[in-house]
């Protein structure tokens, strides 16, 4: 199974070779000619027509991942809709790239945790969000911690929460640490799941 990085000539990143010693850098034209069933294909999102290329290669059975210099939830959803199995920053460390390859090779989907939190936050809002939240679910939190927890559950970044509550990002991080500890969760995704489960009950 080949590992092909589809990019412009100037885009070669040393950490790609650190992740996969056998990796080959190819142009979009070469990828169309060479990529097939089971190959790991990494497509840069700054290539013209990258979505069409993802659709074509995924249709052949290649395990396509999209790499971006400026990841966004909109671009991630576009990549997944086109058939990509993963989406991450182009400058991700080698161990993360290897993890992506492993997950996608086993038919999984790999997306940056922050972007997944935004997607889940959208689902949380669609289900009623804060208006459906029962008071006892967050009764062990202070008023400020509750406000931070609900904003994060809606998919907001630390910067957005800080702006909304008129506090610093450092304070948001401190509140999140306390929230995670009190609710027994490890990260933002678990927080969203915990609040959603409490609502369902």
Image (cartoon, helix red, strand yellow):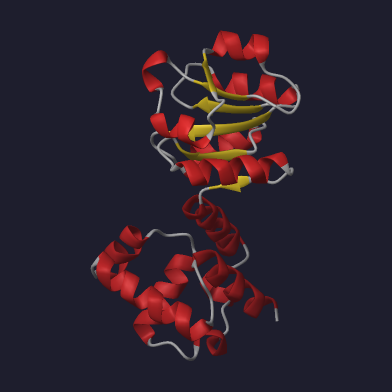
Quarter of the image with the N terminus is top right
- Give the image location of residue 95, x and y in percent: 50, 46
Residue at coordinates 24% horizontally, 70% vertically from top-left?
167
User: Which is nearer the eye, 195 or 127?
Assistant: 195
Horizontal side of 67 relative to 55 (left or right) equals left
- Give the image location of residue 23, x and y in percent: 55, 25
For the view shown, which residue lies furthest in the front direction?
21
User: Which is nearer the eye, 198 or 95?
Assistant: 95
**Above or below 160: residue 200:** below
Horizontal side of 11 relative to 80 (left or right) equals left
User: Which is nearer the eye, 7 or 21?
Assistant: 21
Q: Determine which quarter of the picture holds residue 37.
A: top right
Quarter of the image with the C terminus is bottom right
- Give the image location of residue 133, x and y in percent: 56, 78
- Give the image location of residue 136, x and y in percent: 56, 90
Residue at coordinates 68% horizontally, 21% vertically from top-left?
57
Residue at coordinates 47% horizontally, 31% vertically from top-left?
16
**Above or below 39: residue 188:** below
Horizontal side of 10 relative to 197 (left or right) equals left
Residue at coordinates 57% horizontally, 8% vertically from top-left?
29
Q: Determine which quarter of the picture holds residue 141.
A: bottom left
**Above or below 48: residue 92:** below
How many numbered callouts? 0
């Amino acid at each position: 199974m080949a590992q092909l990085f589809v990019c412009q000539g100037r885009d070669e990143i040393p950490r790609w070779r650190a992740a996969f010693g056998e990796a080959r850098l190819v142009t979009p034209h070469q990828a169309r000619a060479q990529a097939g069933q089971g190959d790991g294909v990494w497509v840069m999102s700054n290539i013209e027509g990258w979505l069409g290329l993802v659709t074509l290669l995924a249709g052949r059975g290649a395990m396509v991942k999209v790499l971006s210099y400026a990841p966004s939830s909109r671009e991630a959803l576009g990549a997944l809709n086109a058939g990509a199995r993963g989406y991450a920053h182009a400058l991700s460390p080698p161990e993360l790239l290897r993890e992506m390859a492993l997950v996608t090779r086993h038919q999984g989907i790999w997306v940056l945790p922050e972007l997944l939190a935004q997607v889940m936050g959208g689902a949380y809002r669609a289900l009623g969000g804060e208006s459906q939240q029962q008071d006892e679910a967050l009764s062990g939190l202070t008023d400020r911690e509750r406000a931070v927890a609900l904003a994060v559950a809606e998919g907001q970044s630390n910067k957005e929460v800080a702006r909304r509550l008129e506090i610093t990002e450092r304070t948001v991080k401190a509140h999140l640490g306390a929230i995670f500890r009190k609710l027994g969760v490890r990260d933002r995704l678990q927080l969203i799941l915990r609040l959603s489960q409490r609502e369902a009950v």
